[in-house]
Image (cartoon, rainbow, N blue to C red):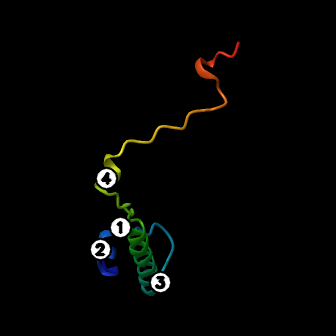
Amino acid sequence: MSADQAAASVEIQVLGGSASEEELAALIAVLSEAYVAEEADAVAVHKQVSVWQRNQRGLRTPLRRDVPWGRFSG
């Protein structure tokens, strides 16, 4: 998406002050470019997982050797 398309899709309201047309144009250009950059960076990266990895069940945790069998040590 270009800055022109971003400017068309982003609504900017000036609620106060007395900015000139040049100042408003500069503001719109900077905000539009920042919006485009943020939108481009906001894309989630999908981790590639093979079918084999997806179907593998998790490995069992190793047995604890410090606990006696049946947890009875008497």
Give me the disc on residue 23.
Answer: 3
Along the line of sight, which residue is nearer the eye, 33 or 64?
64
The residue labelled by disc 2 is 8
Q: Position of residue 29 (x, y in %)?
A: 41, 81
In the figure, residue 71 lies in which quadrant?
top right
Camera-side residue: 8 or 55? 55
Quarter occupied by the N terminus: bottom left
Q: Nearer the viewer, residue 21 or 64?
A: 64
What's under tag 2, amino acid-wise?
Ala
Task: Tell me the residue at 33%/74% (across/down).
Answer: 6
Which-is-in-front pick, marks 3 and 2? 2
Please report whichever mark, 3 or 1, sits nearer to the chain's N-terminal start.
1
Which of the marked residues, 1 or 4, is nearer the chain's N terminus? 1
| Label disc, if present, on residue 52 of the rendered structure | 4
Residues at circles 1 and 4 in contact by the CB criterion of under 8 Å: no
At x 48%, y 79%, the residue is: 19
Q: Quadrant of residue 5?
A: bottom left
Q: Is residue 68 left or right of residue 32?
A: right
* Apparent side of residue 44 relative to residue 1 in the rendered image (left or right): right
